[in-house]
């Protein structure tokens, strides 16, 4: 991997080391990978690998004035509808240099160096995938800071947010975001502690990417599986798969879930996917959800019979606003204990307060059953 990306490294490194800015003020940080990194204070030229919305939330309205290059595929490909929405509002995003993708061998060391960044921000999974290439970036005098919202715990969310605040000279804004996140999760946990979770509902979660004819990924211990574990639900994928993978139709039917959770998004090239995200009308989301109920045997599942079929925005999991999904699923699982919680209001407030683009959409929903339309 990356064999085509290392050509010309010596020449590119020479250019970089002779043209990189001299930093008047440095910060010594410990990133989420427990690495000590020297970075410039209030960096102005950043290569951004992932966590685009989290970066915007911390950086503020002019966030992308600081960005010189991005890893485009994880945004444009995985969250295409989100990408299109932000590009429409902030056209300069589409003009940024693309450093390639760590997962398919297209990541370009030369493009990173040519952008002459003050630093590179990477997700933990990107840093791990780069291996020796990450070392070469730092050998060229470009520091890398590793962030980690993928760990799905409050500690890493808070740590990543505070790191961004220090790097961007937005410590106060970052601290507010980190505190609000931690407080929101703690409030959910406090109510959960008062609930007898021994009898948590049986839940089946599936990525709604390929349509009803293909059983797509379920999750155990990660992604939505981790959220279900946190909420004390009986995730039927536990013990059947490691991390993610499909469950068989026969197994799902035999487990007779009491709640079904479908994860939708705005993927590129997935014509039968459950569409969710910015500017998506809930009617479209529901129209893409309903065919799943036509799968053989699903009409007899407790979840379907009782109208307990939900969908959440997959692109929002493992973000600074994912506490809204925690609230939504807590309310779906334990409606009496969370009756007064308004997860949609929490999500709306986050976007209104912290994001440079104001838009609505469908991020969480329950499929209306026959009796309610």
Image: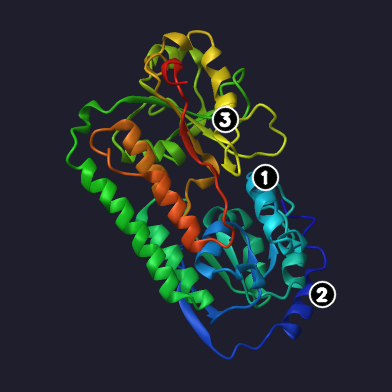
Identify the mark nearer the N-term, 3 or 1: 1
| Circle 3: element type | helix
Distance Cα–Cα, label 1 vs label 2: 35 Å
The nearer-to-camera label among 1 and 2 is 1
The nearer-to-camera label among 3 and 2 is 3
| Circle 1: element type | helix
In-image side of 209 versus 57 (left or right): right
Identify the mark nearer the N-term, 3 or 2: 2
Residue 72, quarter of picture: bottom right
Residue hosting label 2: 11
Badge 3 density bin: few <14, some 14–19, many ≥20, Cα 10 Å: few
At x 44%, y 19%, the residue is 369
The nearer-to-camera label among 3 and 1 is 3
**Above or below — where is 87 with respect to 310?**
below
Q: Nearer the viewer, residue 42 or 21?
A: 42
Residue 135, quarter of picture: bottom right
Residue hosting label 3: 283
At x 38%, y 45%, the residue is 343
């Amino acid at each position: 991997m990356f064999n085509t990306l290392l050509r010309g490294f010596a020449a590119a490194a020479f250019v970089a080391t002779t043209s990189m800015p001299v930093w008047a003020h440095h910060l010594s940080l410990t990133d989420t990978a427990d690495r000590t990194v020297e970075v410039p204070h209030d960096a102005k030229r950043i290569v951004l690998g992932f966590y685009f919305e989290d970066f915007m939330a911390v950086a503020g309205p002019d966030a992308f004035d600081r960005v010189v290059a991005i890893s485009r595929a994880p945004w444009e490909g995985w969250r295409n509808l989100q990408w299109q929405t932000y590009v429409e509002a902030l056209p300069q995003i589409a003009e940024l240099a693309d450093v390639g993708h760590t997962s398919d061998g297209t990541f370009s060391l030369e493009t990173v160096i040519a952008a002459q960044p003050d630093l590179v921000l990477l997700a933990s999974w990107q840093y791990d995938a780069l291996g020796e290439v990450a070392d070469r970036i730092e050998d060229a005098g470009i520091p890398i800071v590793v962030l980690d919202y993928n760990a799905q715990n409050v500690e890493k969310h808070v740590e990543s947010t505070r790191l961004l605040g220090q790097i961007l000279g937005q410590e106060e804004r970052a601290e507010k975001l980190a505190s609000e996140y931690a407080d929101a999760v703690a409030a959910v946990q406090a109510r959960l502690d008062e609930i007898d979770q021994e009898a948590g509902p049986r839940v089946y979660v599936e990525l709604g990417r390929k349509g009803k004819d293909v059983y797509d990924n379920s999750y155990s211990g990660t992604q939505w599986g981790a959220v279900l574990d946190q909420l004390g639900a009986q995730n039927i994928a536990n013990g059947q798969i490691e991390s993610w993978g499909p469950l068989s139709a026969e197994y799902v039917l035999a487990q007779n879930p009491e709640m079904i959770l479908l994860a939708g998004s705005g993927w590129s090239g997935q014509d039968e996917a459950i569409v969710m995200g910015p500017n998506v009308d809930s009617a479209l989301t529901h129209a893409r959800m309903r065919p799943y109920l036509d799968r053989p045997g699903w009409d007899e599942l407790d979840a379907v019979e009782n109208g307990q079929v939900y969908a959440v925005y997959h692109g929002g999991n493992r973000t600074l606003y994912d506490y809204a999904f925690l609230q939504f699923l807590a309310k779906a699982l334990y409606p009496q204990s969370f009756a007064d919680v308004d997860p949609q209001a929490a999500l709306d407030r986050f976007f209104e307060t912290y994001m440079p683009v104001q838009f609505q959409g469908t991020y969480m929903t329950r499929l209306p059953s026959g009796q309610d339309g």
